[in-house]
Image (tube, rainbow, N blue to C red):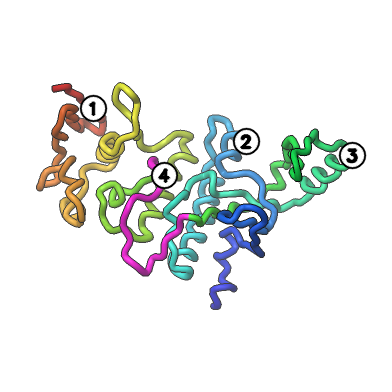
Amino acid sequence: MNIIEHIFRLFLIIIHSSTRLRNPVFPDVVHDPLSISLYEFRQECFPESRLTKDLTRACILVILYALDFLHNHAKLIHTGNLQENDIILQLDDLTALSDFEEQELNDPSPRKIVGDHVICTARELQVAMTAYGPPVLCDFGQAWFSEVQNSGQIQPYQYRAPEVIFGMKWDEKVDIWNLGVMIWDISMGRNMFKVRGGPDNEEADVYHLAHMVALLGLPPVDFLRRRTTDTPWRYFDGEGECECIPGPMMVVLLITDNILLIARTIN
């Protein structure tokens, strides 16, 4: 099947044309009408911000189809923002757009003119629950080609894969890790891993890794030895056991029955 005809491409945002009107860096693109993000949909339409099991399964299936096309046919890794804000619901019923247009004609939004710009207040698009269609995966501004070896920091902190944290080479599997963590978010209504800690509640790899270990167990030693930097050995010894972090702030990771304790000692 020709790549352009591949059915799974329908689960990615399809750009019909693009141009640059004013900004030389960011293009203006034309695509089919879309509605709200999966995050907004979850927050606004469901109690406790949790999708139902059936909706969660449907969303996962669509995103996996999109990633299958991206990884196996387009040879791209999404890497950057595989999160709910970049999964946008389509519109199966365009009535909301017609209603929006009619409201704007009959009762124009307040506006002001500044030079050659017309600035209008935003008008909310009223969409019925039955008008929402399947999600599409968007935002490929940070996508990487998968046919070359890649390394470096990618992904939102919360969804960062272990190989990225450890400074290893990574491939399209980081998208699957990212998706797995996001699935927890949309089905449970909260983050899978805590990435903040300490007196200042700062983001740090040590907290992220500690919660990974608490939930998933210690990483295989063979995996740690794939590293291209010494980063893994800041947290684990040569046998893959948790180790203290040297320096004025010592962090000891203790795992007991999947309950994580972080003991901090100031030298």
Which kind of residue does numbered mark 4 sit on? Answer: Pro
On the image, the x and y values in percent for residue 267 come to 13, 22
Q: Is residue 126 visible?
A: no
Q: Mark yes or no: residue 119 visible.
A: yes
Provide the residue span drawn in magenta: 142-158
Q: Residue at x 28, y 58 (%)?
A: 169
Q: Which residue is mark 4?
A: 156
Q: Which residue is mark 2?
A: 45
Read off the residue under disc 1. Answer: 261
Q: Is residue 162 left or right of residue 251?
A: right
Q: Which residue is mark 3?
A: 106
Q: Mark 1 to mark 4: distance in Å?
A: 25 Å
Q: Amino acid at mark 1?
A: Leu
Of residues 247 and 237, the one drawn nearer to the viewer in this rendering: 247
Is there CB contact under 8 Å for labels 1 and 2?
no
Closer to the eye: label 2 or 3: 3
Measuring from the top left, give residue 228's x and y in whole percent: 20, 56
Farthest bottom residue in view? 1
Q: Residues within 10 Å of mark 1 (few under 14, many from 20)?
A: some
The mark that comes first in sequence, 1 or 4, is: 4
> How would you classify the magenta stretch by its main secondary structure?
loop
Q: Nearer the viewer's eye, disc 1 or disc 4?
A: 4
Q: Is residue 220 left or right of residue 126?
A: left
Name the quarter where the N terminus is drawn: bottom right
Secondary structure of residue under mark 2: helix
